[in-house]
């Protein structure tokens, strides 16, 4: 391709995206096949999409298991997808299938958040959108929100935040924000971080794509990217009492995740944190190969973590 052409490549960040001179964004790591919401015949899980903000185009996909008792209140799971802040969505087959399976096995209601993605919407938009979605969920606490599934069946005193990779990074930040700003009527019982993406101050840590999509900040010191930096002061603000962290043995992020785990234990936060390492596996293997034995074990551990709170 002629780089002097108006459609030539202006910025190239494989394997995530490239930006052409005419402004077009091409996601190199193509989003998995998108699927519509459905009534899943195998699990009985229903899903539907709703717009949270017309102004921002912020939306969520809601999931509900088969309801046996109309008066039953179920734990509420808010799930935030990964993808380096710039690829994937709740509507991809990968995430739709994963959340459907989790809702079925854990018997929870789930809200899967579609935050606006970089590079069209640089950070901190993903953080702000996710917080707006969580506040929208909280607007149903008194049973008079716009979504009947949440009004009738969500137990807001048993709310969990979960995510993977960049989504797990967002989950951490949302739980900190809840601790700092409050979230009326919602009790975050726990958070699940699957192979979370965190930055580091180490010289070998470099992320040109992150520097591009989060302009105007020193990402190596910013607590949103590197919560362990500056002594991990914000860790003590986490508004939950339990944390479950997963790390993959072959993941390049492995050591950073352990640093986070150790910093959290020493932060004065006071909750219970557990870290589980899956040997011989790489980053988000459980999403890429969900039927493998280790992914099924990981799913059972998440289910047990959620169901341990009554």
Image (spheres, grey):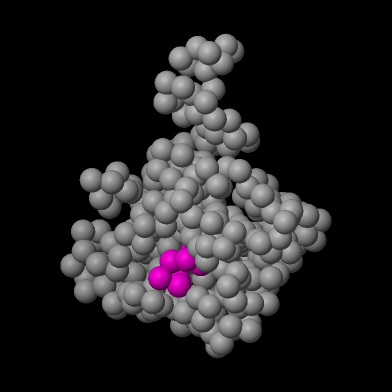
Image vertical order of residue 159 relative to residue 298, above or below: below
Question: Where does residue 13 sit, x and y in percent of width and height?
Answer: 59, 35
302 in the magenta segment: no
Residue 108 in view, yes or no: no
Judge from the rendering whether residue 134 lies leftward or rightward of residue 295; answer left or right. Answer: left
Question: Where does residue 129 sit, x and y in percent of width and height?
Answer: 36, 54
Image vertical order of residue 189 relative to residue 102, above or below: below
Of 284 and 232, nearer the camera is 232
Judge from the rendering whether residue 15 lies leftward or rightward of residue 212; answer left or right. Answer: right
Q: Quadrant of the N terminus?
A: top right
Total of numbered circles in the picture?
0
Residue under the point 46% across and 22% down: 21
Image vertical order of residue 145 relative to residue 157, above or below: above
Judge from the rendering whether residue 224 lies leftward or rightward of residue 70; answer left or right. Answer: right
Span highlighted in magenta in the image = 171-177
176 in the magenta segment: yes
Residue under the point 41% across and 77% down: 179
Q: Tell me which corner region of the image, top left, top right, bottom left or bottom right, holds residue 194.
A: bottom right
Residue 12 in view, yes or no: yes
Question: Where does residue 195 sit, x and y in percent of width and height?
Answer: 64, 59
Residue under the point 33% across and 48% down: 59
Q: Tell me which corner region of the image, top left, top right, bottom left or bottom right, holds residue 54.
A: top left
């Amino acid at each position: 391709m002629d780089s002097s052409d108006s459609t030539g490549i202006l910025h190239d960040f494989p394997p995530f995206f490239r930006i052409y001179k005419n402004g077009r964004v091409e996601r190199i790591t193509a989003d998995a096949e998108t699927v519509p919401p459905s009534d899943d015949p195998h699990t009985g899980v229903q899903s539907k999409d709703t717009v949270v903000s017309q102004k921002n185009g912020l939306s969520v996909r809601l999931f509900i298991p088969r309801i046996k008792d109309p008066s039953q209140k179920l734990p509420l799971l808010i799930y935030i997808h990964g993808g380096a802040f710039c690829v994937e969505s709740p509507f991809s087959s990968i995430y739709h299938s994963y959340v459907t399976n989790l809702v079925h096995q854990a018997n929870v209601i789930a809200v899967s958040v579609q935050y606006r993605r970089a590079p069209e919407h640089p950070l901190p938009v993903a953080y702000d959108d996710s917080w707006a979605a969580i506040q929208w969920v909280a607007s149903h606490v008194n049973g008079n929100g716009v979504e009947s599934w949440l009004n009738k069946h969500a137990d807001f005193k048993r709310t969990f935040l979960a995510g993977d990779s960049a989504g797990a990074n967002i989950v951490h930040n949302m739980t900190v924000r809840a601790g700092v700003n409050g979230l009326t009527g919602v009790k975050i019982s726990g958070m699940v971080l699957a192979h979370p993406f965190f930055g580091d101050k180490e010289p070998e840590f470099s992320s040109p794509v992150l520097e591009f999509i989060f302009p105007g900040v020193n990402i190596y010191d910013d607590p949103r990217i590197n919560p362990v930096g500056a002594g991990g002061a914000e860790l003590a603000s986490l508004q939950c009492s339990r944390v479950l962290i997963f790390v993959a043995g072959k993941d390049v992020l492995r050591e950073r995740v352990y640093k986070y785990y150790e910093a959290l234990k020493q932060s004065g936060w006071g909750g219970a944190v557990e870290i589980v390492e899956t040997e011989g596996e790489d980053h988000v293997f459980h999403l890429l190969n969900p039927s493998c034995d280790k992914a099924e074990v990981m799913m059972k551990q998440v289910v047990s973590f959620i169901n341990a709170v009554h």
